[in-house]
Image: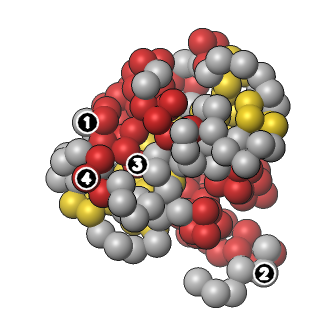
């Protein structure tokens, strides 16, 4: 399995790094992509070096796209046509499409949440266009996975693992990481 994680200026560092870390612990190949410049500065001033330029990313090479949230990172993702095009390709291609915190607004903007149950950081529900907003920490509706915020980064990432490589692998990673509160 291969996952692409786009990193936009102002992304939430806990979310971006947790997604990459947990998926790699599960043996999933993860590639991070920058939109404008590399390294990418997160919303708390932590710079992260991405693997590739998003211009070199093709949806056909990946099984999942996972968007970390944060502000202004989520808005920067939403405003980038390349990101929207990738989301549409993943969604229409029957691939896992995921977003955490404020980033579900990007999925809403792309039009892939219509009729889907989804969650997001409180206050962004109206930007999940077409979604049925639910207040759960992590929501999986078919191939759409959403999470509520930075504190949900590990459960969100474990749900991605379950969707991509199986519940048994997710439980193994959860145990090895000593995640006991979920």
For the residues marked 2 and 1, what is the alpha-carbon distance in whole angstroms? 37 Å
Quadrant position of residue 57: top right
Of labels 2 and 1, the one closer to you = 1
Question: Which residue position holds label 1?
Answer: 111
N-terminal of the two: label 2 or label 3?
3
Find residue 126 and name its label: 4
For the residues marked 1 and 3, what is the alpha-carbon distance in whole angstroms? 11 Å
Question: Which residue position holds label 3?
Answer: 104
Question: Is 153 displayed left or right of 100 in the figure?
Answer: right
Q: Residue at x 17, y 53 (%)?
A: 115
Q: Does the rendering let one see residue 1?
A: no
Find residue 35 and name its label: none
Question: Which residue position holds label 2?
Answer: 178
Q: Residue at x 63, y 39 (%)?
A: 10
Relative to residue 167, is residue 41 depicted above or below?
above
Of labels 1 and 4, the one closer to you = 4
If the image is split into quadrants, where does the C terminus sit?
A: bottom right
Q: Label 4, secondary structure: give it.
A: helix
Q: Residue 78, how many percent across, how many down?
A: 42, 31
Q: Characterize the local packing of mark 4: few (<14), some (14-19) or many (20 or more) Cα atoms within 10 angstroms.
A: some
For the residues marked 2 and 3, what is the alpha-carbon distance in whole angstroms? 28 Å
Q: Characterize the local packing of mark 2: few (<14), some (14-19) or many (20 or more) Cα atoms within 10 angstroms.
A: few
Quadrant position of residue 109: top left
Of labels 2 and 3, the one closer to you = 3
Question: Is 11 displayed left or right of 82 in the figure?
Answer: right
Of labels 2 and 4, the one closer to you = 4
N-terminal of the two: label 4 or label 3?
3
Quadrant position of residue 155: bottom right
Of labels 4 and 3, the one closer to you = 4
């Amino acid at each position: 399995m291969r996952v692409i994680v786009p990193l936009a200026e102002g992304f939430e560092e806990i979310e971006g790094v947790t997604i990459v870390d947990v998926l790699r612990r599960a043996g999933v190949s993860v590639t991070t992509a920058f939109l404008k410049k590399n390294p990418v500065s997160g919303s708390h001033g932590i710079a992260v070096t991405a693997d590739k330029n998003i211009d070199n990313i093709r949806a056909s090479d990946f099984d999942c796209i996972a968007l970390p949230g944060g502000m202004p990172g989520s808005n920067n993702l939403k405003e980038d046509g390349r990101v929207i095009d990738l989301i549409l390709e993943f969604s229409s291609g029957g691939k896992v499409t995921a977003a955490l915190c404020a980033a579900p607004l990007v999925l809403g903007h792309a039009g892939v949440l219509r009729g889907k149950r989804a969650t997001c950081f409180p206050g962004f529900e109206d930007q999940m266009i077409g979604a049925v907003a639910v207040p759960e920490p992590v929501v999986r509706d078919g191939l759409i996975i959403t999470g509520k915020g930075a504190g949900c980064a590990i459960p969100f990432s474990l749900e991605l693992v379950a969707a991509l490589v199986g519940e048994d692998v997710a439980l193994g990673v959860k145990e090895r990481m000593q995640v006991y509160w979920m």
